[in-house]
Amino acid sequence: MLHGARIVLVIPALDEARAIGAALARVPRWVDRVIVVDNGSTDDTAAVARAAGAEVLSEPRRGYGNACLAGIRAAGEAGVIVFMDADGSDHPEQMEHLVAPIATGRADLVIGSRALGQRERGALTPPQRFGNVLASTLVTWLWGVRFTDLGPFRAVRRTALERLDMDAPTFGWTVQMQIRAASRGLACCEVPVDYARRSAGRSKISGTVRGVWLAGTGILGCIARERWLQQRRGPAFPREKTR
């Protein structure tokens, strides 16, 4: 626990056997549960995660969002749910910066912003940086809220997350969460986090042309869908600026 809140960490993982053990070893001891969602790995990701002390859940339906949703369902009575990648690029030691604003009642959603923190050289590829700026700019233009990053390292209050009705199955998951949180009046903020190059293996997004294409279309498609849904339903929720 941290500040009296029960913390559950959800880590989606696909073929990360070479990286996930070291990432899990760095998770703070105050995290109550660590759930690794094996998203159809063909390597020993699940076995390595279990050996490192994590709970392992299988979600054979491919897709980052599908894996996150499975982790949420398994999280139970968490006060705060944290999401982190399995590739060693995030810094678990900085997790308290994400959790503390929620645990102390100052925020509902906290995004770890790689744009505001220190990045190891080569950690974010040019397509990733361009896509991040483009998507963030579109969110600002369409919803009037400012985010600097769509990074996966984030924390959210469990009761607030339930209000978002998350359903994005793939890479649109992160931007959907930010759009819905802002448009439904949740208190959102960003904190700087550092970002490293993945410790092993190849990125599912930036490692291939296909990965870049799928991530880009997934994110932009999600933005377009959320805008269409909002125009169809109308602004049913008050909007709160991010801090």
Image (spheres, rainbow, N blue to C red):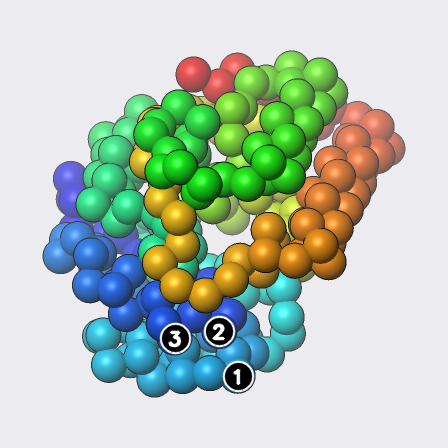
Identify whether 7 is placed above or below 140. Answer: below
Amino acid on which the number 3 mark rests in the picture: Ala
**The C terminus lies in quadrant:** top left
SS at circle 1: loop
User: Gap between marks 3 and 1, in whole Å?
Assistant: 10 Å
Circle 3 packing at 10 Å, graded few (<14), some (14-19), many (20+), is many
Q: Residue placed at 75% from the left, 39% from the top?
A: 220
Residue 42 lies left or right of residue 48; in this view the side is: right
Q: Which residue is mark 1?
A: 42
Residue drawn at (42%, 31%) of the image: 113
Kind of residue indicated by mark 1: Thr
Q: Nearer the viewer, residue 31 or 170?
A: 170
Query: In terms of secondary structure, where does tag 3 sit?
Result: loop
| Secondary structure category for the residue under label 2 | loop
Distance from Cα at disc 1 to Cα at disc 2 = 6 Å
Q: What residue sits right under mark 3 in the picture?
A: 17
Residue 178 can be seen, yes or no: no
Question: Viewed as shown, does residue 232 lie left or right of 139?
Answer: right
Label of residue 15 in the image: 2
Q: Earlier in the sequence, mark 1 or mark 2?
A: 2
Task: Tell which of 173 and 158 is nearer to you.
Answer: 173
Task: Kindly report the distance in space between the C-alpha atoms of the residues bearing marks 2 and 3.
Answer: 6 Å
Q: Quadrant of residue 97?
A: top left
